[in-house]
Image: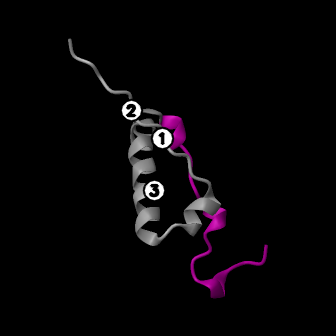
Amino acid sequence: MATTEPAPPVRTWSAAELRRLPPDQRDEALATAAERAAADYHHDYALTAFEAFGPEDIHGDSADARPG
């Protein structure tokens, strides 16, 4: 009879906790979170169906920017 071990608990980091970590540990934690989220973003169009900037948000050369 095969037994399966339960998955270890997943750590949830706050932004403040991540900022206090050394860079290599922070990168590892963020990479793990990205791996866990990848399937959600791949299968749920609503998570990526938006524009970060609309045409009125991008002014190009700052000398041409209109006061807003």
Question: Horizontal placement of 62 versus 6: left or right?
Answer: right
Q: Secondary structure at mark 2?
A: loop
Residue behind mark 3: 30
Residue 43 location, quadrant: top left
Count of numbered circles on the image: 3
Magenta segment range?
A: 45-68
- Can the viewer see residue 54? no
Q: Quadrant of residue 62?
A: bottom right
Q: CA distance from mark 1 to mark 3?
A: 13 Å
Image coordinates for residue 68, horizontal then vertical, percent: 79, 72
- Residue corresponding to mark 2: 7
Residue 38 versus residue 64: which sits nearer the camera? 38
Amino acid type assigned to the residue bearing label 2 in the image: Ala
Residue 66 falls in which quadrant of the image?
bottom right
Q: Kindly indicate whether the residue at mark 1 contacts the one at mark 2 (C-beta within 8 angstroms).
A: yes
Residue at image x 47%, y 63%?
A: 26
Q: Is residue 31 visible?
A: yes
Q: Position of residue 67 (x, y in %)?
A: 78, 78
Q: Nearer the viewer, residue 19 or 55?
A: 19
* Mark drawn on residue 56: none
Query: Where is 12 relative to 26, above or below?
Result: above
Q: Residue at x 47, y 37 (%)?
A: 9
